[in-house]
């Protein structure tokens, strides 16, 4: 009898393990919502296919538009202020040694957790990734984007104006168009390894994180992805700064244009080429994601695998006169988010519900039947994914310090912090003195009516109700 009972309990536990959804967790780098399914001219057939199988979030936002704070936040479910991480050089475990991570939580609950590509932040921190979160060593997770050069004999590059312009990627150039295979660059190799790892883990509950390095600069996708676009037919750049915006809302575009003292004006030709290159990078990344999705479909476990795709933050490609990220504007804060639940999830629909990347931890835990650890700052989006609710929160929050990369400045402290709230209608931002908390500048954009945020309406008397609502929501989350 005792032996039969043990066999029954073993069978029940095995069945429970099989019934638990797997998680395919796909992250892009520096990717605003430039997908076909979002109405963009970007050619993204594979991500569009994923969107048709799940729920597309049209108002999802990062917590800070730079890699380490954003990734640390979403992977711990805590906001940058909770973690005390606002720059790229401090590993999140330095001030938070015992904090629970999203993959670590799944690992604690008997999932096999694997990391392929860039998931935790890389390069600037002394600690490489976060090995305790994973069941095996990470792969291609710690490198420099500027070193993503072709690992094959190099043909001559094709018709590029900025190849040797020393704009931020001084060793190899910012734009590059070579007729090389996908695996010549990081993302092709990430896709190949993710497919290999999938064959290893598919027979057990798994959390497979696949971090693509694109469309982050340099803009060097293989030639066939550049060839998908006619540069003359791409949308024109509107580089105007928002009227009435304070100077501190902007930054020096150092990542792309190089040190301010060495910057030269960006020509129309160079701007068009970089925008073309950004789209080429997007289509290159989309093709690699397609390979992983196809492998999952052929694995036999797709029907019990939850898929989430998102980006760590958005990006400017010349809008507002900015190149790169590190602002609180919509272009930097807004991210794509797609969730396909294996059972009972919404399919082929979009939601205008506000969402944040900090919500991913509680969302995935709930959808996979796991408890939630204490201390999470996010809100589960599971009821949206299941089609049970139309909204779960009134606002989304993004922040960024000035200087944008203060850890590279003498003294290493922010002078101001910009706290920004996105409601269903507007974006409101307060710039506060870091020490005194005094508000030194404010912005109000009618983002739904003015998506490019071209006019700061903070002094307009016509929008007092929108301002009062947004200010109240911001103060509730970030008191002065």
Image (spheres, grey):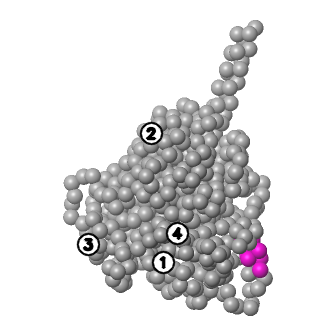
Q: Marks 4 and 3, Cα distance to the nearest angstrom?
A: 34 Å
> Mark 1 = which residue?
251
- Neighbor class of circle 2 (other Cα within 10 Å; few <14, some 14-19, many 20+) is some
User: For the C terminus, which image quadrant?
Assistant: bottom right
Determine if residue 202 is in view: yes
> Mark 2 = which residue?
137
**Which residue: 60% across, 64% down?**
63
Q: Marks 2 and 3, Cα distance to the nearest angstrom?
A: 36 Å
- Neighbor class of circle 4 (other Cα within 10 Å; few <14, some 14-19, many 20+) is some
Q: Nearer the viewer, residue 376 or 117?
A: 376
Badge nearest the viewer, 3 or 1: 1
Q: Is residue 472 magenta?
A: yes
Relative to 384, residue 104 above or below:
above
> Mark 4 = which residue?
413
Q: Quadrant of residue 224?
A: bottom left
* Image location of residue 24, percent across then percent down: 55, 46
**Which residue: 22% across, 58% down?**
154
SS at mark 2 in the image:
loop
Q: Is residue 16 magenta?
A: no
Q: Marks 3 and 1, Cα distance to the nearest angstrom?
A: 24 Å
Q: Nearer the viewer, residue 249 or 35?
A: 249
**First of labels 2, 3 by sequence position:** 2
Residues at circles 4 and 3 in contact by the CB criterion of under 8 Å: no
Magenta highlight: main SS: helix
Q: Which segment did they paint magenta?
A: 468-474
Relative to 162, residue 339 above or below:
above
- Label count reads 4
């Amino acid at each position: 009898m005792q032996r039969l009972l043990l066999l029954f309990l073993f069978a029940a536990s095995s069945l429970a393990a099989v019934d638990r959804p797997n998680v395919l967790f796909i992250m892009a780098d520096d990717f605003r919502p430039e997908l076909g399914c979002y109405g963009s001219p970007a050619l993204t057939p594979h991500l569009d296919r994923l969107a048709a199988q799940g729920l597309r979030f049209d108002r999802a936002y990062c917590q800070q538009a730079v890699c380490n704070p954003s990734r640390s936040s979403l992977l711990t479910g805590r906001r940058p202020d909770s973690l005390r991480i606002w720059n790229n050089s401090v590993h999140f475990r330095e001030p938070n040694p015992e904090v629970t991570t999203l993959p670590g939580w799944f690992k604690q609950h008997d999932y096999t957790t694997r990391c392929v590509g860039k998931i935790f932040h890389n390069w600037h921190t002394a600690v490489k990734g976060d090995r305790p979160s994973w069941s095996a060593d990470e792969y291609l997770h710690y490198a420099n984007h500027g070193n993503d050069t072709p690992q094959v004999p190099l043909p001559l590059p094709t018709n590029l104006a900025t190849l040797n312009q020393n704009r931020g990627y001084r060793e190899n150039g910012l734009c590059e168009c070579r007729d090389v295979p996908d695996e010549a660059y990081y993302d092709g190799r990430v896709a190949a390894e993710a497919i290999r790892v999938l064959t290893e883990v598919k027979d057990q509950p798994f959390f497979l994180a696949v971090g693509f390095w694109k469309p982050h600069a340099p803009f060097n996708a293989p030639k066939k992805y550049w060839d998908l676009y006619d540069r003359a037919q791409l949308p024109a750049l509107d580089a105007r700064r928002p009227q009435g915006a304070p100077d501190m809302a902007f930054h020096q575009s150092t990542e792309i244009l190089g040190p301010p003292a060495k910057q030269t004006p960006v020509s129309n030709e160079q701007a068009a080429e970089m925008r073309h290159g950004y789209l080429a990078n997007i289509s290159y990344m989309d093709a690699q994601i397609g390979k992983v999705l196809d492998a999952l479909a052929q694995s036999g476990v797709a029907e019990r695998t939850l898929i989430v795709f998102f980006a760590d933050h958005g990006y400017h490609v010349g809008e507002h006169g900015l190149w790169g990220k590190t602002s609180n504007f919509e272009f930097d804060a807004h991210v794509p988010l797609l969730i396909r639940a294996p059972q009972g999830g919404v399919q082929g629909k979009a939601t205008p519900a506000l969402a944040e990347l900090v919500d991913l931890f509680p969302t995935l835990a709930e959808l996979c039947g796991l408890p939630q650890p204490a201390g999470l700052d996010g809100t589960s989006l599971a009821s949206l994914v299941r089609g049970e609710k139309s909204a779960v929160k009134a606002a989304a929050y993004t922040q960024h310090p000035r200087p944008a990369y203060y850890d590279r400045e003498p003294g290493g402290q922010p002078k101001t912090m910009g706290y920004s709230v996105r409601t269903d209608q507007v974006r409101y931002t307060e710039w506060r003195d870091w020490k005194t908390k005094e508000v030194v500048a404010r912005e109000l954009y009618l983002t739904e009516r003015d998506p490019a945020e071209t006019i700061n309406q903070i002094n307009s008397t016509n929008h007092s109700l929108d301002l009062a609502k947004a200010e109240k929501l911001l103060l509730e989350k970030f008191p002065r």
